[in-house]
Each structure stands twice: as C-alpha cells, then as structure tokens.
Amino acid sequence: MILIHKATIVNEGEAYTGSLLIEGDKIIKIYRSGVPEYICKRSNVMDASGLYLLPGVIDDQVHFREPGLTHKGDIASESRAAVAGGVTSFMDMPNTNPQTVTIDLLNEKLELGYEKSAANFSFYLGATNENIRELKRANPKRICGVKVFMGASTGNMLVDDREALQRIFAEVDMLIATHCEKEEIIRRNETRYKSKWKDDILVKYHPAIRSEDACYRSSAQAVALADKYGSRLHVLHLSTACEMSLFNDAPLRDKRITSEVCVHHLWFSDVDYERLGTRIKWNPAIKTLRDRDELRSALQLGKIDLVATDHAPHLLSEKEGGCLKAASGGPLVQHSLLMMLELAVQGVFTRELVVEKMCHAPATLFRVKNRGYIREGYFADLVLVNPAKPHTVAAENLFYKCGWSPLEGYTFSHTVEKTFVNGKLVFDRGKIDDSVRGTALEFDR
C-alpha cells in the first residue's frame, strides 16, 4: 500500500489537508484528519506536506502521430510527455497514416496503446464522406467518440458532403466531436491575401484567413444539426468570442451540446505572433486579446465545459515558412496543467476550477468510468504538484519527440513532482518508469 500523507487535496470544489491510501490500482481510503498508526506502519508513506494532490488530467484532444507520422511523435514518446505534465489519460485523434476510419484500424491502434502508452488512452474513430457504416458499428463503451472534421486540417479528413454530414448527425448514436471551420470562407480569404502576398503570406494574417466568421458559421452549423437530430455534440477548440453565443451555462450533466477550449487559446493572443511566429500557428488560429479574454470568461461561467491541448507535434523544420507553408499545431501536453495553474496564480481562474475543467469535466462529459476524481474506489490516477518550486521550460527537460516547445524560456511557479497511473508511480521528479503501462479507458454509456 502507498500512503500519500498530508497533501493539500484539491478536488470537487474544495481544498483541504488530507491523506490518501492506494492499494493496487485503486484509491481505497481518503483521510481528512489523522491516519491510524497501523496504516502508516503497513504502508509506503510519501510525505506530501506542502504539495497539491490533484486527480490526473484527462486530455480529450491529442495527436500522438502514430501510426505513420512517427517522425513527429509517437504513442510512447508523447504519453511520456503527458505523464510528465500530470496528464494520466488521453483521447487521440484519427488523422494518422493510415487514418483511423475503420473498426479494424481502431483495434490496431488500441493494441499500440496497450503496448506503448505510459498513460491511459482512448482513440476517436474518424468520419469520412463514405464510412457511415463503420461509424454505426462502433461500440460506444469502447471508444471516446466519432471525430468529424468540418474544416480541413492536418491529414485532410474534411467531411464536406452535405448528405454525409446529415447522416452522421442523424444516425450515429454516440458523441460526435467536431473541428469547426467553414472551408469555403477560408478559401475565399486565402485567395484575397494571395492576391497581395502571393504564397508568402505572413503568419500574423493566419487568424484573418481562418477567420472568426469561418469558425462561427461552422460551429453554428454543427449546433443546428445537433439540435435538429438530437445528437450528442462536442465542439472542439473554440477560438472566438462570437461562438460563445452558441452555448449555455446549464449543468454539464444536463447538456447534449458541449464545448472545449485549448490552453493555447487561453494563453496566447495575436500579439504573440510577432515574438513566436509559426510556433503558435494552430488551426483554428489564435486570435485577438478580446477573443482570449471572452474564452476565459466563458470557461468561468460554464459556457465552455473543459480544457484540453490539441497537442500536435511537428518538427521545427515543418514549422518553417509563412501562413500557407508552415504546419499547424504544436506540442503542449507536458505543460497544460502548469499553464492553467499559472493562470490561477495570476487570478484568472481558481485552483478548484482548473481541476474541475481538466479532470472532473472530461470524466463527466465522456462518462469515463471511475476516473477524473479523487474518490474511494476510483482508479489512482493522481498528480502531486509543488506550488513553491519554479519550473523553467528548456529543450533539455522536454519529453516531446519533436524536441521543442513554444513555451521555452518561460518559468512556471509550479512543478509537477509525481504522477501515478492506476496506482503506479510513473513519473517522479523528472524521471519516468518506462515499465509502467496505461490501459484503455472504459465508458459508462
């Protein structure tokens, strides 16, 4: 047994000093006061005085690049980065090579997870214009959802056939997660900027090409389809203030239409393009300070339901060029929790809200079985954070296979000290136990 002793437990809207007992892969006891002496004698006691004890983060949107794109990252490398950042479970996207658009390919990817992943895992089944039969065959207890690209992105899995899109919303009986950007608006904007800049469009114009109108019109279409067919819709990586009018602040358990914001849209704004260039080029684009601040406010108010990363590593050589040539996406899964806790230090959020939106809400929204909370009988997916030990992001302490971060040189006020996955200490003060393997998430649907 492992006893995490005298930690500041941040969980379910409160913070208190307590201790937690782990046996096997489960939390078997939470102590709010003293721990019996016989428990201390029988346990491996970890003194956690002064440390925060949080549930493990569940990231509902990552691109770990396996199979087929493993020069950028792979399940082994990026899951190691995840646990180094306190992320104990992830949900991986289907735009790999081959694309995860059949049940057979999904099963192959699950086997890769069991073989290689340091964290717990699930994989989306990707939608295309032609694979409605595969989507309807999927078991909702085994996969996190169906991913629909309503805007073209890395991997070009655009679903642009109107009838196919309607059938997906009408006939797929599981969560539909969407990337929403209106392709015809993007192409029209791109043509206008090409007329002036040819193919050398500066990256600062990326949010003008992938504009707020492109985002809003596509998100509104997704919401309208979900309303019409009663679909379970989850809109990913919101990036604009105007999209907030599409969502409400009802309790999460009562919603059939939910939304996500990514840490980069809460952290950066368009003023950062001059300093960081294509290192912060994402789809959807990082937009204005007003958009960033409205996203922060919507998260606080409950219009946005959870926080993720859209972790999408590329080699730095692939990030070269301007608005049209540089790859979109970047690595963030190792630092998302630190970013959110830093915003809490700045007074933007509270620690309790960070835990709610990164741990509790993903578990509730996806109905992940027995994870995302510090509760007796739940899996011991846990993170110990030192709030008094700064951490400076540098190339030498990155676990990303791509070897870079847009946060290099930034010093966070917190450090992730230890991460437990299913009761096993997988990350401990900068070192990873490569013998630890996560397991496939189960869904209570």
Image (spheres, rainbow, N blue to C red):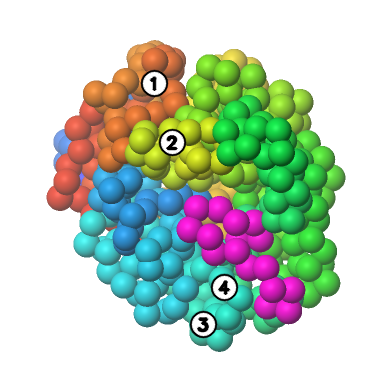
Q: Nearer the viewer, mark 3 or mark 4?
A: 4
Q: Which residue is mark 4?
A: 128
Residue 286 left/right relative to 416 = right
Disc 4 secondary structure class: loop
Q: Is residue 21 above or below residue 342?
A: below
Tell me, yes or no, whether the highlighted magenta stretch contains residue 162.
yes
Q: Quadrant of residue 440?
A: bottom left
The label shown at residue 319 is: 2
- Inter-mark Cα distance, 1 to 2: 16 Å
Number of numbered discs present? 4
Q: What amino acid is at disc 3?
A: Glu
Q: Residue at x 57, y 18 (%)?
A: 274
- Inter-mark Cα distance, 1 to 3: 42 Å
Q: Quadrant of residue 54?
A: top left
- Inter-mark Cα distance, 3 to 4: 10 Å
Work out whether residue 131 can be spotted. yes
